[in-house]
Every structure is written in structure tokens, then in C-alpha cells.
Amino acid sequence: MGKEKKEEQVISLESQMAEGENVFGVCHIFASFNDPFVHFTNLSVTGRMKLKSSPYAAILAAQEVAQRCKELGITDLHIKLQATGGNRTKIPGPGAQLGLRALAHSGMKIGQIEDITHIPSDSTFRKGGRLGHTVCE
């Protein structure tokens, strides 16, 4: 009649891989100027970190993602870097470079780095209208 405690399943990829085999994961870094998202995926595992937009916060998020990857047995990462894109800025925020550097310094092997920022083929109007953002005094 009491509450039953649910047991957490421990997920590990170590039993699936052979000795000395590399297990690849994909790390998505979305770096806007407001929040950096560091997100890694595999076929059966996912993890996510979101912090305020500062280089130090991106470093902490990347270190935690690298630690979680090592716990799961992921040894190598492919990195996909994304800025806001569209009709907004195509330049990644301040946490992108340092988050990427923190992943490399944490002992993870980096496979390939790919920029997947959305670039429009036909532009819509930016926010602010035809004359741009004007300030009246």
C-alpha cells in the first residue's frame, strides 16, 4: 500500500563494444547569445546541459557532458556546431569556442567538426521593418 521506489537502470555501452574499440557519439552545441546548449546523443543514450550564456558556463557544461560520456563508454565525439541562423545572426555565441575547447581538453577524441547553422536560400525580412530599428529622441 506504500509508495514503491523505482530502480534506475544503469545504461552502459561497455558490454556492447570489443576491447580497444572506439564508440562514437554526436555532440550538438547550440550557441546563441542567450544560452548555450550542449547535447550529446547515441543510438540509445542522450544527455543535455543548458546554462546561461557565458564562456565559463559553457566550459562547465562541456566538462559535465564529457564526464557523462566517459561513464557510458563513449570515447570519440563528432561535433555539430550551430548558431541561431535563419534571418538572425550566423555567428555562434561566446560559449561555442570554449565549450568545444573544454571537450577536447577533457580527454575526448574529436572526430569531425561540422557547422550546421541554418542559412536561408531566400531571405525574409528581419525584425525592425523596412527602415530598421530607429530610436526617437
Image (cartoon, rainbow, N blue to C red):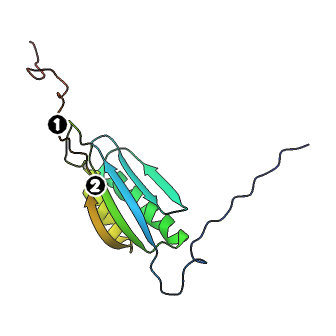
Residue nearer the viewer, 22 or 93: 22
Q: Which mark is residue 122?
A: 1
Residue 99 visible in the displayed image: no
Counting residues from the start of the chain, the first of labels 1 and 2 encountered is: 2
Give the residue pinned by disc 2.
96
Q: Report helix, strand or loop for mark 2.
A: helix
Total numbered labels placed on residues in the image: 2
Disc 1 to disc 2, how far (Cα)? Answer: 27 Å
Q: Is residue 29 left or right of residue 125?
A: right
Instruction: Answer above or below: position of 130 versus 86.
Output: above
Q: Which mark is residue 50?
A: none
| Residue at figure coordinates x 44%, y 59% from the top left | 40
Placement of the N terminus among the 4 image quadrants: top right
| Residue at figure coordinates x 50%, y 64% from the top left | 68
Answer few, some or many: residues within 10 Å of disc 2's Cα (few below 14, many 20 plus, some between 14 and 19): many
Instruction: Answer above or below: position of 51 versus 15.
Output: above
Answer few, some or many: residues within 10 Å of disc 1's Cα (few below 14, many 20 plus, some between 14 and 19): few
- The spot of residue 131 in percent (x, y) is 8, 20
- The spot of residue 6 in percent (x, y) is 75, 53
Kind of residue at disc 2: Ala
Nearer the observer: mark 1 or 2; the answer is: 1
Q: Report helix, strand or loop for mark 1.
A: loop
